[in-house]
Image (cartoon, rainbow, N blue to C red):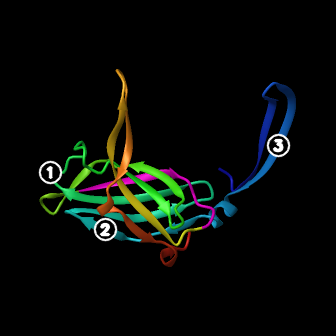
Amino acid sequence: MPEQFLLTIKVNRIGDIQGNWSLELPVSRKLSDQATRTFEPGISHEVNGISINVARVVMTPLSATIDYEMTVPENYSFSDPSAISSIQVKDDKGYIMGMGFVGGEGEAVEGDRRKYRFTSEHLRTPKETPEELVIIPQRKIIERQDESVTYFRGEALEPYVFHVPLLSRAKKQE
């Protein structure tokens, strides 16, 4: 994409109203890059032999992305009902940014442990850069079932909840 361009949006109908409208919006990669914040907190939290590390957080004007590493015992099964299946993310003011699902290919680490790398993408960016994030690992709970569909909801695994400071760990965007 070019560094700068004019985005033109043409609309010929809004609801039942016909028309011919055109909106032009200037788009600048420079402004977007200036508004992007990258953090590399390297904060880990370990409980019962399960370690979750927040490797990188990228906040753009439209969305946030978090890269994780999770190290578990080799016999850990993500299909177990009590296993971590997702991670909800809140900011320090309680704003729910969204959630991401745990998964990926595990690689062997130090004998009887496996490391998984995964990313929570398309999280909502808070209006103000938070001082810290609250990472809430969750397990799947069956909410209800009908003959063809099972509906799940997340339930926080309280011992695994941890805080990740950000503002003191900003990395200059290159």
How far apart are the alpha carbons under marks 3 and 2?
48 Å
The circle on residue 169 is none
In this picture, residue 153 sits left or right of residue 171: left
Task: Label 2, secondary structure: give it.
Answer: strand
Residue 122 located within the stretch drawn in magenta:
yes
In this picture, residue 166 sits left or right of residue 155: right
Which residue is tagged 1? 75
Identify which residue, 66 or 171, lies in the foreground: 66
Q: Nearer the viewer, mark 1 or mark 3?
A: 1
97 in relation to 152, above or below: below
Q: Position of residue 93 (x, y in %)?
A: 54, 66
How far apart are the alpha carbons under marks 1 and 2?
20 Å
Q: Residue at x 62, y 66 (%)?
A: 128
The circle on residue 23 is 3
The answer to which of marks 1 and 3 sits earlier in the sequence is 3
The chief SS type of the magenta part is strand
The answer to which of marks 1 and 2 sits earlier in the sequence is 2
Which residue is tagged 2? 45
Identify which residue, 170 or 165, lies in the foreground: 165
Q: Position of residue 13 (x, y in %)?
A: 80, 28
Question: For the residue marked with disc 1, what is the amino acid?
Answer: Asn
Image quarter for residue 161? Answer: bottom left
Question: For the residue marked with disc 3, what is the amino acid?
Answer: Leu
Which stretch appears magenta?
Answer: 115-128
The answer to which of marks 3 and 2 sits earlier in the sequence is 3
Question: For the residue marked with disc 2, what is the amino acid?
Answer: His
Q: Residue at x 58, y 68 (%)?
A: 129
